[in-house]
């Protein structure tokens, strides 16, 4: 399931060292950087082009319940044998909260570019605490990620029910 291409503004240097800037259409920033390198441009800055709107200003927030739901759905996907990156796409498609969908796609992009799942969620400390990140890391290291996600989902659901 391919994501729609987005437009990215870039700055960089060409093979002769001259500064260059422009726009490139790509699935995400990492793919845009790779394409620029293939074209002989060393990107120094790649950013998504404007035209979007601030979802936080519309009142859309990511709640602990959203994180619990994401974790449960990801655990279910993993148990079904769906590859991790594809699981992110499927779960993101099913999310009603646009900010949560965006967060999942950011995590997917991190994992797709070669980082571990634990590293990807550690870059989002406002949503994933140290315990969550460390347990995901332990699950990845031991090869029991689906079991760990299942336990994390149960923990998150119970802590939300207590609140």
Image: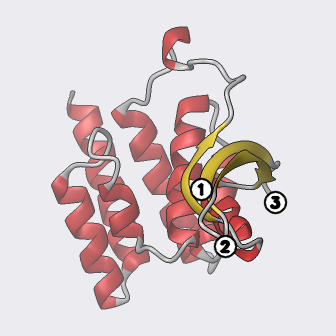
- Closer to the eye: label 2 or 3: 2
The residue that appears at 45% across and 23% down in the rendered structure is 61
Find residue 159 and report its horizontal and vertical position in percent: 22, 40
Nearest to N terminus: mark 2 or mark 3: 3
In this rendered view, identify the residue nearer to me: 34 or 116.
34
Foreground residue, 30 or 154? 30
- In this view, the residue farthest toward the bottom is 142
Is residue 48 placed above or below 34 in the rendered structure?
Answer: above
Residue that carries the numbered disc 1 in the rendered image: 12
Q: Residue at x 61, y 69 (%)?
A: 85
Residue 65, quarter of picture = top left
* CA gap, disc 2 and disc 1: 10 Å
Name which of mark 1 and mark 3 comes first in the sequence. Answer: 3
Q: Position of residue 70 (x, y in %)?
A: 49, 49
User: Left or right of 152: which side holds 79?
Assistant: right
| Numbered disc 3: secondary structure | loop
Q: Which residue is mark 2?
A: 15
- Does residue 13 sit above or below 59 in this rendering? below
Judged from the image, the secondary structure of the residue bearing numbered disc 2 is loop
Task: Kindly identify the residue that appears in the image at 33 percent across and 71 percent down.
Answer: 148
Q: Is the residue marked by circle 1 packed among few (<14), some (14-19), or many (20+) residues within 10 Å?
A: some
Quarter of the figure that contains the C terminus: top left
Classify the position of the N terminus by image quarter.
bottom right
């Amino acid at each position: 399931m391919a994501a729609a291409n987005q437009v990215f503004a870039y700055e960089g240097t060409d093979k002769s060292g001259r500064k260059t800037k422009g726009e490139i259409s790509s699935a995400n920033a990492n793919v845009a950087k790779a394409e620029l390198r293939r074209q002989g441009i060393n990107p120094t800055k790649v950013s998504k082009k404007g035209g979007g709107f601030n979802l936080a200003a519309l009142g859309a927030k990511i709640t602990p319940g959203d994180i619990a739901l994401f974790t449960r759905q990801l655990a279910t996907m993993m148990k079904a044998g769906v590859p991790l990156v594809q699981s992110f796409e499927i779960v993101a498609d099913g999310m009603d909260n646009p900010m949560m969908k965006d967060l999942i796609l950011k995590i997917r992009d991190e994992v797709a570019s070669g980082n571990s799942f634990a590293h990807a969620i550690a870059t989002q400390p406002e949503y994933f605490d140290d315990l969550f990140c460390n347990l995901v890391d332990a699950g990845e290291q031991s090869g029991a990620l689906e079991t760990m996600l299942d336990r994390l989902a149960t923990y998150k659901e119970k802590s939300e029910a207590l609140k």
